[in-house]
Image (cartoon, helix red, strand yellow):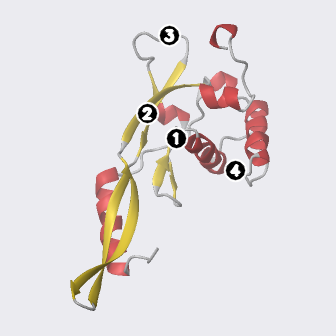
Amino acid sequence: MTPLPPAIRALWAVALAALSGCTGAGEYRDDAVNVPVPDFASAQIDPPPGVNPDGCWVRDVAPAELETVTRQVEVAPTRFRTETVQVIKRERQELIFETPCPDRLTPELISTLQRALEARGLYRGAITGVMDVSTRLAVRRYQNANGLPSGLLSIQSARGLGLLATPRDQL
C-alpha cells in the first residue's frame, strides 16, 4: 500500500477531527487507529427497555473504518496515472452493550483480565490491576476480533475470557 502524500494526510486528519469532535473528559485516543477509548464513567447509560435493570450498560461509538486503495488508471495507451481513494470498510456504529458493573471491576479481576489478554498476545504492559489505556486498547483488540469494536469490557467478553461465570440459563 502506498502512503498518502503529507498534504492529503493533513487534510484527512482535519476532516476526521471535525467529524469526530473533541475527545471528552475521561477519554483517551488510540493513536494506532485514531479513535477515542472511553472510560466507564463517561460511557455509562441507563439500561435499555426490556433488559435486566440491575445490569450496567454503556454506549460507545465505533468510528467508520476506512481503507486507502491505490490503483493505476490508464489515461492513454501506455500512459497511466496513480489514483488513491478512501473506501469505507465499515460504517460508523453506535454500540450499546452490558458491561461488568464498577463494583465487580476489582483490581484482582482487572489483573486477571490483563493476564488473560497477555496470554493471547494482546496485552504487553505490566500487570497492575488498573483499567488503564493499555488495558483498554488490549480489550479493544480482543473484542474487535469478536465483532465488538470497543475498549469497554463487555459481559460477553468477560465470560469468554473466563473472568465471570455464565448463568445456567444462558449456557
Query: Residue at horizontal 47%, vertical 49%?
Result: 36
Q: CA distance from mark 2 to mark 4?
A: 22 Å
Residue 93 point in image, percent of width and height: 38, 39
Q: Is residue 104 left or right of residue 88?
A: right
**Which residue is the site of mark 2?**
95
- From the top left corner, tell me how far across and down residue 135 is, in percent: 66, 46
Relative horizontal placement of residue 107, taking residue 96 as reference (left or right): right
Q: As drawn, is 5 to the left or to the right of 130?
A: left
Instruction: Residue 12: give x, y in percent of width and height.
Output: 33, 67
> Cα distance, mark 3 to mark 1?
22 Å
Query: Which one is in front, 57 or 26?
Result: 57
The residues tagged by marks 3 and 4 sit, at their Cα atoms, a distance apart of 32 Å
The residue labelled by disc 4 is 122
Measured as percent of width and height from the top left, residue 55 is found at 55, 16
Name which residue lies at 72% across and 33% down: 161
- Label whose residue precedes the other's in the sequence (1 or 4): 4
Helix, strand or loop at label 3? It is loop
Give the residue number, with chain letter if any, for mark 3: 53
Q: Residues within 10 Å of mark 3 (few under 14, many from 20)?
A: few
Q: Look at discs 3 and 4 and give the one toward the viewer.
A: 4
Q: Which amino acid type is marked by label 2? A: Leu
